[in-house]
Amino acid sequence: MRLLFEVIIYCFVYTLFVKVAKGSNPLNCLYFYPEPVRKKAYTLGLADEKSVHKRAKQFFTYFLAALVILLFVFIVIVNKTQDFGAAFAELYLILVIGNWFDGIVIDRFWVSRKSWVIPETADIPHLKPWKTVLVRRTLGTFAYIPIAAIFALIFSKLSICIWNG
């Protein structure tokens, strides 16, 4: 039950970051869109590449930092997990479920809503095809193994230091 609650919080925070980044204008997060959409937006003068790149760097810096802090809070502060295996299992499950949540719920269903369409680029598909989503999320499932292992090692050691003095 605790793990389910953590997954829900993780996905909520993930969604909140994307919602805040987009605001009321999909151009605010043009960096999420496929290259043809971005190129057309640049050509039409709706955005400039330098600003979009800067905004993307800012978003991903805060986004990744917030998610790492959230995972730290789950593993070290709330659960006081000192065992590498337990930390790895929890981190891996949260990361993989978050990965699939992003691909299916955010990339396919939420982005299919009208509010994500940039009117001047409506003729260009802005949704990732199902095949792309499935391939990338499957690859991500494997890519999260070493990432979860690294953070599990760090977090379990920190938990030992913090809670055992």
Image (cartoon, helix red, strand yellow):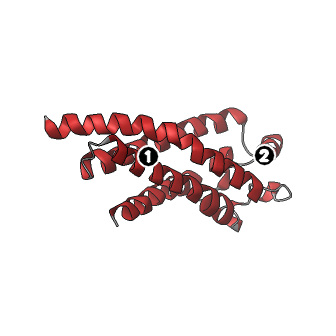
**Are the residues tagged 2 and 1 within 8 Å (C-beta)?**
no
> In the image shown, does 32 or 161 lie closer to the viewer?
161
Q: Which mark is residue 67?
A: 1
What residue do we see at 49% from left, 54% from top? Answer: 14
In the drawing, does residue 19 fall left or right of residue 156? right
Determine which quarter of the picture holds residue 164.
top left
Circle 2 or circle 1, nearest the eye = 1
Quarter of the rendering occupied by the C terminus = top left
Position of 165 compared to 123: left or right? Answer: left
Mark 2 neighbour class, 10 Å CA radius: few under 14, some 14 to 19, many 20 or more: some
Q: Residue at x 65, y 57 (%)?
A: 107
* Residue 117 image position (x, y, % from top left): 73, 60
Residue 20 appearing in the image = no
Is residue 152 in sight in this rendering? yes
> In the drawing, does residue 124 fall left or right of residue 130?
right
Residue highlighted by disc 2: 41
Residue at horizontal 66 percent and vertical 55 percent from the top: 26
Q: Between residues 80 and 115, which one lies in front from this camera angle?
A: 80
Say few, some or many: other residues with alpha carbon within 10 Å of mark 1 (under 14 / 14 to 19 / 20 or more). some
21 is higher (above) or lower (below) than 12: above
Residue type, label 1: Leu
The kind of residue tagged 2 is Ala
Q: Position of residue 6 (x, y in %)?
A: 38, 59
Q: Position of residue 28 (x, y in %)?
A: 62, 49
Q: Quadrant of the N terminus?
A: bottom left
Q: Secondary structure at mark 2?
A: helix
Please state the total of marks drawn on the protein image: 2
Q: CA distance from mark 2 to mark 1?
A: 30 Å
Farthest residue toward the left? 165
Mark 1 residue element: helix
In this orientation, which residue lies closer to the viewer: 155 or 49?
A: 155
